[in-house]
Image (cartoon, coloured by chain):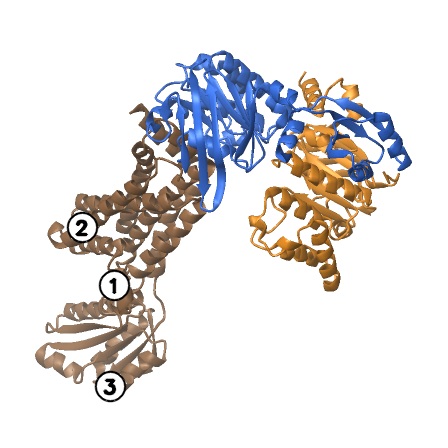
Amino acid sequence: MSRFIGFVKKEFSHIFRDYRTMLILFGMPVAQILIFGYVVSNEIKDIKIAIYDKSKDNVTQEITNKILSSGYFIIDKNIDNDNQVEDAFKKGNIREVIIFEPHFAEKLEREGKASIQILADASDANTANIVSNYTSAIIRTYMKNELMKGELPFVIDTKVQILYNKELKGVYMFVPGTMALILMLVSAMMTSISITREKEMGTMEVLLVSPLRPMPIILGKVIPYVGLAFMNALVIIALSYFVFDMPMQGNLTFLLLETLLFILMALSLGILISTVSKSQMMAMFISMFALMLPTMLLSGFIFPIENMPKILQWLSSIMPARYFIVIVKNIMIKGSGILVVWKETLYLTGITILFLVISIKKFKVRLE
Amino acid sequence: MNEIAVEAKGLKKTYEKVDAVKGVSFAIPKGELFGLIGPDGAGKTSIFRILTTLILPTEGKAEIFGNDVVKDYKKIRNNIGYMPQRFSLYQDLSVEENLNFFARVFGTSVQENYDLIKDIYIQIEPFKNRLAGKLSGGMKQKLALSCALIHSPDILILDEPTTGVDAVSRKEFWEMLIRLKQKGITIVVSTPYMDEANLCDRVALIQDGRIMKIDKPQNITNEFGRKLWAIKSENIYKLIQDLRQFEFIDTVYPFGEFIHITSKDNSMDINSLILLLKNNNHSKIEMLEVQPNIEDCFMELMNN
Amino acid sequence: MLKQTENIIEVSNLVKKFGNFTANDDLTFDVKQGEIFGFLGANGAGKTTTLKILSGLSYPTSGKVKVAGFDVYREREKVKKNIGYMSQKFSLYDDLTVKENIRFYGGIYGLPGKYIKEKTDELLRRLKMENIKDSLIKSLPLGWKQKIAFSVAIFHNPGIVFLDEPTGGVDPITRRDFWELIYEASYSGITVFVTTHYMDEAEYCDRVSIMDQGRIEAMDTPALLKKQYNAENMDEVFIRIARKQQL
């Protein structure tokens, strides 16, 4: 046991003494979350919109004024027939079209109810979401104010319709996605590099010639990274909750357990990479091109899976990160438990065991 | 006969297409300081890696204290001190941390075997908080040796421990090895420096994957078998060219400021050769018969 | 030998400092044309620093340095044109053939194509490597690589060639073949400046200087140094000098 503790201690010394490792371990997660977060939820201003007023009465005029005087929007175009709606999106830099139904004021007065349709271009999902939220908020405020005036109660029904990216990917996507990415980086890339570094420096030779068995060598190298990756996950979750108002509907312990499972999966992948690479350079390249890029591109983190060609969809379905992202989203946003995500969990568990078995089989007690 | 520490029989090692070791056999009695002497690429590292159980021989077998390097590798690993070619230390750990780490890896502590490494460690102790990467070559070498000794092994296998180290550290290192030998540790060391051969009890001269000769250094030089002369003049380059023209001269090798030559019939009239050279416009000619050293023998063996 | 009395390297009161650290402390020495000059010292003694200054890669802090008649402050480019450089490790491209390597280096020095072609053929003939001219460098034994590297370093007929630990690790015969190439170059008037920490390489030099902690502690022919320090070989000379410094 003392051997093992010595090993872990040594590994921590390596990590804490290399400022580049430290930067990757602690600087990057924070930087990435902040960058994604702020790019995504940037304050909006002077967003160009079009208005399709089928009613053109005093109420629609009043609402339009409210929206335009809010400072968030400027009008780019007034539309007067249905065909122009699609065109407006396609041609210009219009983000949103607000459509008042015909006889708006009349309906409000007679039925106490009228509807406004908000169309948002969600090819930039986050902006679309924010823009439509702002618009609805302005309309709601108007509604409240009118109510306060003591007139008859009425309801303006705002129907938000998101175009081009119906699931609104991106809004809550960056947290699970970044988490998968960072954990993959820390666990798989850092461990594979740190194991191959020993091969390169020749210290692995000395370790192999010692009475240490391969298992303690591997575990000793891996355990510090389990701890660090886990800390990273905590930081990411905290940042997303406190800074970016990501909901946390589900059970935190359950989320952390799933996170731990994903870390173990990434670590076993890291060990596997280190058994096939001879140099740090090679370990880095394999991690980059076989792990990082697919994680970013194919997990649904950046590009929606359903828009991918079939072959990429198929590839995407073997990406562990994809399942982890589903799990995290479900737990955080929907508050789901194991009953909902058991399939994904099972897949992660299975693939972890598979990687571990292969890497133990492949790990050599000799140099060749 | 002493107990045998290392025995190799017909060792061969082939990497893809390259034959690195082409059938090597030797036996090293316990307590001997044995040198494997040869240039880069001769197969020294491959032999050492087979002995330290790091690679498998393609053919042949080897035993360390009766344990087979293939089957009994676990037993061997408990009892062997190994220093790979580049000093394999953790550059980002301090001197003390390196030593403590290797002690722990071998399930021992620095205190337990301090006696053994004391002589060596005391020289680097003033720098114990310095990172290993910041040490000079000589100090790295001493630290690596301390780490290899920390578990009190019965045998030390040192792969080119003096390469890239200055002359003073080399000399000190050999003094340390001789002291360790006196404590009964079997030492197998490889080196490309021919002049280090004389410090070993016995040496194997190795070239191109084959051992050309195994014996005591003294016996090897005694067996050179013919006379060797050293000659110089004011123009070494022209002297080499001219000597090669003479029918009766066999080998011509520059040797520092001199040229070492042998003759085909093992006799040479110094005066007539000098006269001959003078006629070829050489001046300041000096010539004398010399005792061959290991390097002369090595070249002689390479030619055979 | 055709040793001339003309100095090709003149160094006086050379000082190079890095912050508080003095890497070269007041060096003064000359090297004559056609001389084989050994520049010895342990790792970290300051050899590399001097070598960089002499080859125009870095400026001295103070002092006068002339190489091949050119001032290293003002005429760096001319200095570079007149020197060749070979280190054991990084001289040749492993994945190019022998011929490609030679041509590449000829091209670097702006030699005309026809000249390069003729000289390449002549060189391959002289090295007896015509039959392997299309082999990749990495497939050749170390000794052959060294010979090619040296020939490439003097391909543009420089006045001086700097050799950085040229013969480490090769077998004794190959090593001697290599020294013969050096003798030949020296005989044809090229100055050979060898930096090394292998003292046995020093035995082959016409003159050596031994550097320790940034200073030149001894400079003479190997024979006279051995006599002066009552030593059998250069190793012992070095040990005596280093020990003296420690006292």
Q: Which mark is residue A345?
A: 2
Q: Are marks 2 and 3 in contact (CB under 8 Å)?
A: no
Do labels 2 and 1 touch, CB within 8 Å? no
Point out which mark residue A314 bears: 1
From the image, state the color of chain B: blue
What residue sits 72% from the left and 23% below the top? Answer: C233
The percent coordinates of residue B49 (x first, y second) are: 44, 32
**Label 3 SS:** loop
Give whichever of discs 2 and 1 has the lower sequence position: 1
Q: What color is chain C drawn in?
A: orange
Q: Is residue B248 above or below residue B178?
A: below
Return the chain for callout 3: A
Residue at numbered disc 3: A82
| Chain that bears disc 1 | A
Q: Are marks 2 and 3 on the same chain?
A: yes
Residue displayed at 48% across by 31% down? B24
Q: Amino acid type of disc 2?
A: Thr
Question: What's the chain of the residue with tag 2?
Answer: A
Label 3 neighbour load within 10 Å: few <14, some 14-19, many 20+: few
Q: Measured along the vertical axis of the image, is residue A337 above or below residue A129?
A: above
Closer mark to the observer between disc 2 and disc 1: 1
Q: Colour of chain A?
A: brown
Of labels 3 and 1, earlier in sequence is 3
Number of the front mark, 3 or 1: 1
Question: Callout 1: few (<14), some (14-19), or many (20+) C-alpha neighbours within 10 Å?
Answer: few
